[in-house]
Structure formats: structure tokens, C-alpha cells
Amino acid sequence: MDLRAIAMGLAFALMWSSAFTSARIIVADASPLFSLAVRFLISGLLGVAIALYLGQTWRLTRSQWRATIIFGVCQNALYLGLNFVAMQTVEASLAAIIASTMPLLVALASWLMLGERLRPLGFAGLIAGIAGVALIMGTRLSSGVDLYGVMLCGIGVLALTFATLALRGATSGGNFMMIVGLQMLVGSAILFVAAPLTETIRVEPSLPLLLAFTYTTLVPGLAATFVWVLLLNRIGAIRAATFHFLNPVFGVAIAAVLLGEKLGPLDIVGVLVVTGGILAVQLARRPAK
């Protein structure tokens, strides 16, 4: 893994982790699904426009179209949609921790369903990750966390896990920015239908809403997704997913600094255990030299 790939991975992890804090700010002043649909519409149109400017085309391969549709449904509509709804009642730090378990779920599903060999380090990582999440959830349950919101976050990360498993190797072939833009437009179309059916649409204009919406549209929404697709193409899904081990730390740190969310000693221990578990699982899944 070269220095450029490391820089891309660090940038992705930081941008991805910050999305939970900006989402928490957005849903305080706007209905979650409608605001996310508008965000995807803007990000998608910008992505397609940039792709056309770069000479890319929407004449994608069959695997790329499959990747575009599945990611648009599972990542944008389900995973992010459910997380936006959940963060009306769930803290950004907890949502980030739940979402960060995706590499653990991918490794577990690959072992149980696809017969992928998992080394002892990987088993240890899975056990550590599960223990860390259980420790964090135990402290949050005792303080009265919203179980419905937690359930929505859990379903969302399962949808993202499915998309990750279904699309191995489907991002090759170029036209990366076009894929990013089109998958956001797919998510936007679904959410524009779901929003009026499931929520009362509201927008209460404020400076925090404007800043958070602009940031989440351009940075986690467009830039982070583009960097992630480039990273997948550069070093492959298994190596790229290693950077997910940074997400629990980045996610809770950003929420603590910008939102003032407090972490107890057991929360900190749990975050470190989950982080170590994710890193162990990803290192165990890397091909042996």
C-alpha cells in the first residue's frame, strides 16, 4: 500500500465519520428523508456534471449498472435513510459506532455464508468487536437509549453489508464519478417517494442547517464516496476496508468536539476494543504474502 493510498484512506475515514455529526445537526431542523433526498439530488447532479466534464459516460458495463442500482438502494436509500431517521433520537457517536461494525459483519457473513477462511486473528477480532459493541450498548441501555433508533441503525448497517458483499469487484472499468453521481440519483428518487409517505415534511431555516447541509452534500456525500470508489479500484476491497477501523474513533471524537456528546470510561474502552477488533479482522482477511 503506497503513501497515496494511505492518504486517500485516511481522508475517506475522516470524511465518512464526520457525516454522523452533520446529519445530527440537519435532522434537528429538517425532516430526515426529505433533507437526504434533496442532498442526494444535488450531489448526484453535481457528480454527473463533473463526470461529463471529465469525459466520462453513463454507458456503463452491466456490473457497473448493477453496482450503481444496488448501492443507490442499499447504501443511499436504506443505510443512510434509516440512519438519518434514527439520529432524531440517537446520538451521532452511537450511530457512528454501529455503522462502523460493517467490516465485522462482512467478515462474519463471508465466513458463514461464503465459506471464506478466517484466520485466528480474525476470530479474535470478531469476538473483540462484538464484546466492544456489547459494552457500549450496555452503558447506553442503562442511560435510556432509544431502542427504535438503535434498531434502525442496525438494519441500515445490514443493508450496507449486503451491498458490500454483492458488489465485490463491480467498481472496475472507469467512469467512477459517473457511478457516484448516478447511484446518488437512484437514492434520491427512492427517498423522494418515501419521504411524503412516512414523515411530515418540514424545514426550519437556520445557519447550522445551512452549513451542515452544504458540508454533508459536498464532503461526505460527494467527495468521500468518490475517494472510496477510487480507493477500491486502487488497492481492492479488502485492503481498503482496513481504514474502517478508524471510524469509531473519528466518529465519537468529532461528535464530542462539535456536539458536546459525552463519553464515559466504559464507552471509551468499548470504542478502543471495537477499533482493535475491526483492525484485527481486516488484517486477518488480507492475502498472505
Image (cartoon, helix red, strand yellow):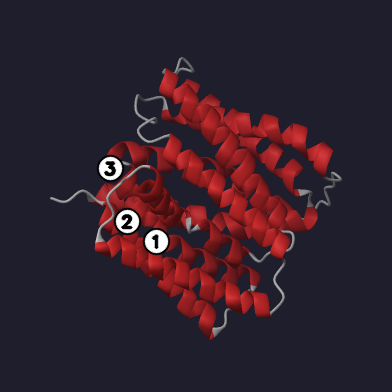
Badge 2: residue crowd in 10 Å (few <14, some 14–19, many ≥20)? many
- Could you tell me how far apart the alpha carbons at marks 3 and 2 are, in whole angstroms? 14 Å
At x 50%, y 53%, the residue is 16
Percent x, y for residue 274?
A: 43, 68
Apparent side of residue 96 relative to residue 59 in the rendered image (left or right): right
Whether residue 63 is situated above or below residue 257 in the rendered picture? above
Q: Which residue is the site of mark 2?
A: 282
Q: Inspect the image, locate mark 2, and give the three-letter code of the amino acid beneath it.
A: Gln
Whether residue 216 is situated above or below residue 234 in the rendered picture? below
Front residue of this view, candidates 26 and 247? 247
- Could you tell me how far apart the alpha carbons at marks 3 and 1 are, in whole angstroms? 16 Å
Front residue of this view, candidates 91 and 174? 91
Percent x, y for residue 29?
A: 79, 55
Q: Which residue is the site of mark 3?
A: 235
Classify mark 2: helix, strand or loop: helix
Percent x, y for residue 119?
A: 25, 58
Q: Inspect the image, locate mark 1, and give the three-letter code of the amino acid beneath it.
A: Phe
Apparent side of residue 217 relative to residue 224 in the rendered image (left or right): right
Q: Inspect the image, locate mark 3, and give the three-letter code of the amino acid beneath it.
A: Ile
At x 46%, y 67%, the residue is 130
Q: Which residue is the site of mark 1?
A: 245
Work out whether mark 2 precedes mark 1 in sequence or the reverse, and give the earlier one.
Answer: 1
Apparent side of residue 29 relative to residue 58 in the rendered image (left or right): right
Give yes or no for contact between labels 3 and 2 (Cβ–Cβ under 8 Å).
no
At x 30%, y 46%, the residue is 116
Classify mark 1: helix, strand or loop: helix
Give yes or no for contact between labels 2 and 1 (Cβ–Cβ under 8 Å).
yes
Q: Is residue 56 visible?
A: no
